[in-house]
Amino acid sequence: MALRHLMSPLDLSVEETNRLLDLAVDIEHNRDKYAHRCDGKKIATLFYEPSTRTRLSFEAAMMNLGGKALGFHDASTSSVSKGETVADTIRLVSCYADICAMRHPKEGAPLVASMYSTIPVINAGDGGHQHPTQTLTDMLTIRSLKGRLENLTIGLCGDLKFGRTVHSLIESMSRYKNIRFVLISPEELRVPSYVTEEMKEKGIPYKEVIALNEETMKDLDVLYMTRVQKERFFNEEDYVRMKDFYILDAAKMAVAPKDMIVMHPLPRVNEIAPEVDKDPRAAYFKQVQYGVYARMALILTLLGLDKEDK
């Protein structure tokens, strides 16, 4: 089998994405069938910046498949602190593991790793650029809870400038029929122009608004909230000014569509009030569970173990 990596959700065709999501659904409903599919396999999780959900999700995914996990969750505890390059790190990790998930604050670092790796490399988030496995998680969540990936109006709210989950989701969902976006952000945190230019070229309808209110939400099938990311700001003053720009609370949910689902890549800070958690439309903790199934399906696919006879 040819070595394959995942740097962007667009590395998978629409057909491949649909097959992977089908596999994730089968895993959800038939856990025992996949419990030993990765016996003897190991995943290396190389996380150069903090993470809870993504790292543990990858490790849980491999363990659920019968495999094992190794790696580091803090670059300061690895040889990176001694000056080791990404290229050298992945060379040695290729000797220890069968597949690797890498998160790095620098855009393109996982791509560099893939050029020197002899095992599949998964981009687990590179700066403000891409987060393909979160996108697969988001798509699985939407398909499972809304029953489709077409004919949807998706509202994206908060930090749309630095939000890598937002950029990846827009690119992936734009490949499906009749998708519309409502981009809700302060002017300082709008979606980068290269993203909107791509939407224009593809004829994807979208509008940019500032307010999160009944008028904005009335036609939404999905509201995707994001936090303002302190680690992406160059100064504290700008972060403090932006961090509480949007707060989704019970009052706003009261005027939202009855069948709208609320998603969030997590962690949240103040942008979703805890009172929303008990609303049946709150899907962000379900999203976490779907993330495990999506990553299990991806691991199997990249290792060539996704077929029944394997």
Image: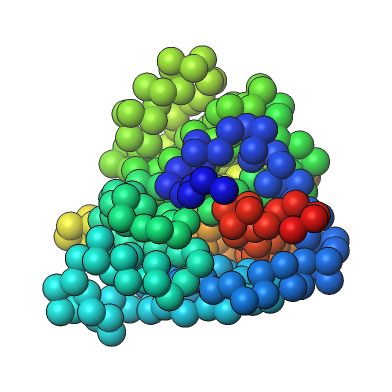
Of 156 and 240, nearer the camera is: 156
Outermost residue toward the left? 83
Dividing the picture into quadrants, the one containing residue 109 is bottom left
Horizontal arrangement in the rendering, residue 250 relative to residue 4 (left or right): right
Rendered position, 253 above or below 30:
above
Horizontal arrangement in the rendering, residue 242 relative to residue 119 (left or right): left
Q: Does residue 270 appear anywhere in the picture? A: no
Rendered position, 93 above or below 261:
below
Residue at point 40% right, 43% down? Answer: 160
Rendered position, 222 above or below 219:
below
Q: Quadrant of the C terminus?
A: bottom right
Instruction: Tell me where residue 51 appears, x and y as whole percent.
Output: 43, 71
Instruction: Tell me where residue 9 appears, x and y as whole percent.
Output: 51, 42
Residue at point 18% right, 57% down? Answer: 234
Dividing the picture into quadrants, the one containing residue 250 is bottom right
Residue at point 66% right, 23% down? Answer: 177
Outermost residue toward the front? 1
Of 213 and 84, nearer the camera is: 84
Residue at point 70% right, 39% down? Answer: 18
Outermost residue toward the bottom? 77
Q: How is the image coloured?
A: rainbow
Instruction: Tell me where residue 164 appears, x and y as whole percent.
Output: 41, 48
Q: Does residue 272 appear anywhere in the picture? A: yes
Instruction: Tell me where residue 182 appears, x and y as whole percent.
Output: 53, 32
Callout count:
0
Dividing the picture into quadrants, the one containing residue 180 is top right
Of 257 and 105, nearer the camera is: 105
Of 271 and 249, nearer the camera is: 271
